Image: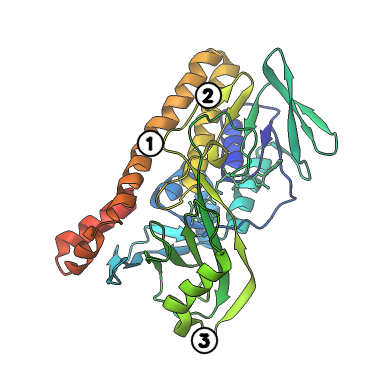
């Protein structure tokens, strides 16, 4: 049983089906397709993971290719980094990305139960054996994968939980350079940033990420100030679609433990998002694949539960921790003039290439 049909849950379901594990049920609060508040940016690693899952051929045609980055530093210097004609990243509206992954999982025999609000574990002899929904419905399972995102109350993680706040909106007809996303490190949001991600040739999403240890900042005021400072001219004549939306992103510098008897945690429920950029889609899908591999090993008898889940913890740590620590370092760099100096030296091709490489691999 998998709780949550976001990228983590659907990647787990798909990989389980690909590995020949039968009787997989995925539940979600919502019927699909459903909206998810997200910048919808797919990094090169996320695209590679979608390729591994066999989903990229159906996601690529509904994505907007990205080959360039407009970067604005805390000191107000700006530069454009380009990957040439070759798209390195993509934007795919989460409504569509999650639905594609979901359809692929269902096509492979996974059962979907919408409207299931998982609320408590059914535990026997210290082992998770099922989950009860808010309306009293129950599902029993040999394995329960927790993939219900940032608000999860089922996590086993014992490290400190950090929160990045966000607020964003969608607009039609905002001018922008084609195939280029924008990241603006403004003093208003430091050590986080604001962004503009083009979703189609006419529609963009714009948002900010910020920290608020005191919980005193007003997200709408902060976002309005950011928009006024950076996008006032370009938003004249644009049409806003829907309302501004906010959602937390949770992260950690130390994953795990990510399992207990009968239970495995994947994706943002395990706080596996990038501490500097808030990227979480690729980690969600990859941790889902790793968890499915572990469950497939146990069910096939290739490994004991202890071995397979120990390996799962290590795979997540080895895959994500180096980039999370690099993200922590990058946040510290933002408090120094280094990024400004790099961008001021932008005419030096070697500096440009190094900055692009650093951002792509962070
Ligand atoms: C504003 C914003 C912008 C972002 N931009 C990007 C970006 O551009 N690129 C990127 O890579 N990442 C981005 N992220 C992070 C990314 O959205 C998440 O890290 C990612 O969605 C995590 O995937 P997940 O599958 O773990 O969880 P989710 O995508 O959150 O999916 C969880 C699923 O569980 C379901 N669920 C929740 N509770 C229950 C319950 N009790 N019972 C049953 N089902 C339940 C939900 O309905 C949902 O479908 C952004 C996040 C925010 C908030």
- Secondary element at image label 1: helix
Mark 2 near ligand 1 (CB under 8 Å)?
no
Please report contact status of discs 1 and 2: CB closer than 8 Å, yes or no. no
Q: Quadrant of the N terminus?
A: top right
Callout 2 environment at 10 Å: few (<14), some (14 to 19), or many (20+)?
many
Residue 259 place in picture, x, y as percent = 56, 24
Mark 3 near ligand 1 (CB under 8 Å)?
no
Q: Please identify the quarter of the rendering in which residue 77 is found.
A: bottom left
Alpha-carbon distance for marks 2 and 3? 52 Å
Above or below, 351 relative to 322: below
* Of labels 1 and 2, the one closer to you: 1
Reading the image, the residue beneath label 2 is 294
Above or below, 133 relative to 56: above
Reading the image, the residue beneath label 3 is 236
Q: Kindly identify the residue that appears in the image at 51 percent across and 61 percent down.
A: 63
Callout 3 environment at 10 Å: few (<14), some (14 to 19), or many (20+)?
few
Looking at the image, tell me whether mark 2 or mark 3 is earlier in sequence order.
3
Q: Kindly identify the residue that appears in the image at 38 percent across and 56 percent down.
A: 191
Q: Kindly identify the residue that appears in the image at 77 percent across and 44 percent down.
A: 114
Residue 140 place in picture, x, y as percent = 76, 25
Above or below, 43 relative to 12: below
Of all residues shown, which one is farthest toward the right?
136
> In the picture provided, is 246 more to the left or to the right than 175?
right
- Secondary element at image label 3: loop
Reading the image, the residue beneath label 1 is 321
> In the picture provided, is 209 more to the left or to the right than 102?
left
Q: Kindly identify the residue that appears in the image at 74 percent across and 31 percent down.
A: 120
Please report contact status of discs 1 and 3: CB closer than 8 Å, yes or no. no
């Amino acid at each position: 049983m998998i709780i949550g049909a976001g990228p983590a849950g659907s990647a787990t379901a798909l990989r389980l089906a690909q590995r020949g594990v039968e009787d997989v049920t995925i539940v979600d609060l919502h019927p699909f397709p459903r909206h998810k508040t997200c910048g919808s940016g797919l990094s090169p690693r996320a695209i590679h993971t979608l390729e591994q899952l066999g989903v990229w051929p159906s996601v690529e045609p509904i994505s907007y290719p990205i080959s360039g980055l407009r970067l604005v530093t805390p000191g107000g210097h700006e530069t454009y980094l380009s990957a040439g004609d070759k798209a390195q990243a993509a934007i795919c509206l989460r409504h569509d990305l999650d639905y594609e992954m979901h359809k692929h999982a269902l096509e492979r025999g996974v059962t979907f139960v919408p409207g299931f609000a998982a609320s408590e574990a059914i535990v026997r002899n210290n082992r998770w054996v099922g989950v009860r929904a808010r309306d009293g419905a129950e599902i029993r399972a040999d394995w329960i994968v927790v993939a219900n995102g940032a608000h999860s109350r089922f996590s086993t993680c014992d490290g400190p939980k950090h929160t990045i706040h966000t607020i964003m909106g969608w607009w039609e007809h905002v001018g922008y350079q084609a195939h280029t996303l924008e990241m603006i490190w403004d003093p208003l949001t430091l050590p986080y940033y604001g962004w503009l991600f083009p979703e189609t040739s006419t529609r963009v999403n714009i948002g900010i990420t910020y920290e608020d240890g005191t919980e005193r900042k007003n997200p709408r005021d902060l976002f309005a100030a950011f928009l006024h400072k950076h996008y006032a001219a370009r938003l004249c004549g644009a049409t806003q679609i829907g309302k501004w939306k906010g959602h937390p992103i949770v992260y950690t510098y130390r994953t795990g433990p990510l399992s207990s008897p009968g239970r495995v945690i994947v994706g943002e429920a395990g706080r596996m998002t990038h501490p500097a950029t808030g990227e979480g889609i690729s980690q969600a899908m990859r941790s889902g694949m790793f968890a499915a591999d572990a469950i497939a090993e146990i069910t096939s008898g290739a490994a004991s539960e202890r071995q397979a889940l120990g390996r799962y913890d290590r795979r997540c740590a080895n895959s994500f921790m180096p980039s999370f620590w690099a993200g922590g370092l990058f946040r510290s760099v933002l408090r120094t003039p280094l990024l400004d100096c790099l961008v001021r030296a932008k005419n030096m091709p070697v500096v440009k290439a190094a900055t692009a490489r650093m951002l792509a691999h962070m």
